[in-house]
Image (tube, rainbow, N blue to C red):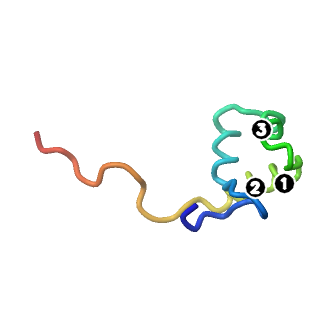
Amino acid sequence: MGGMPTVRGTRITAQSILGRLESGDSVESVLEDHPYLDRDVVEAAALYAKANPPRGRRGGKLWRSTS
């Protein structure tokens, strides 16, 4: 997880829930994949992740190729 906020008692990050919802998945599909969560938890995790975006350098290549 690398210090990312997770849903209590799980290893599911708030960012992963937000990513699924922003890519078009519904709350119901998240709940089907994780039946131990409830709707309020999924919505709260998405709101938290949206309000607190990750800090630091973005992933990817550090240097542009010169060729």
Which amino acid type is marked by label 1? Answer: Val
Query: Measuring 64% from the left and 34% from the top, which residue is drawn there?
Result: 23
Query: Measuring 79% from the left and 43% from the top, which residue is drawn there?
Result: 34
Tell me the residue that label 1 is attached to: 41
Tell me the residue that label 2 is attached to: 45
Query: Measuring 81% from the left and 56% from the top, which residue is drawn there?
Result: 44
Q: Quadrant of residue 2?
A: bottom right
Tell me the residue that label 3 is attached to: 33
Choose the circle earlier in sequence order: 3 or 2: 3
Secondary element type, mark 1 = helix
Query: Measuring 59% from the left and 59% from the top, which residue is drawn there?
Result: 53
Is the residue marked by circle 3 packed among few (<14), some (14-19), or many (20+) residues within 10 Å? few
Report how far apart the C-alphas of labels 3 and 1 lie in the structure. Answer: 14 Å
Point out the frontmost of discs 3 and 2: 3
Q: Classify the position of the N terminus by image quarter.
A: bottom right
Secondary element type, mark 2 = helix
> Going by the picture, which residue comes out furthest to the bottom?
3
Which amino acid type is marked by label 2? Answer: Ala
- Measured from the top left, where is residue 31 in percent x and y? 83, 40
Are the residues tagged 1 and 2 within 8 Å (C-beta)?
A: yes
- Measured from the top left, where is residue 47 in percent x and y? 75, 55
Q: Classify the position of the C terminus by image quarter.
A: top left
Which amino acid type is marked by label 3? Answer: Asp
Is the residue marked by circle 2 packed among few (<14), some (14-19), or many (20+) residues within 10 Å? many
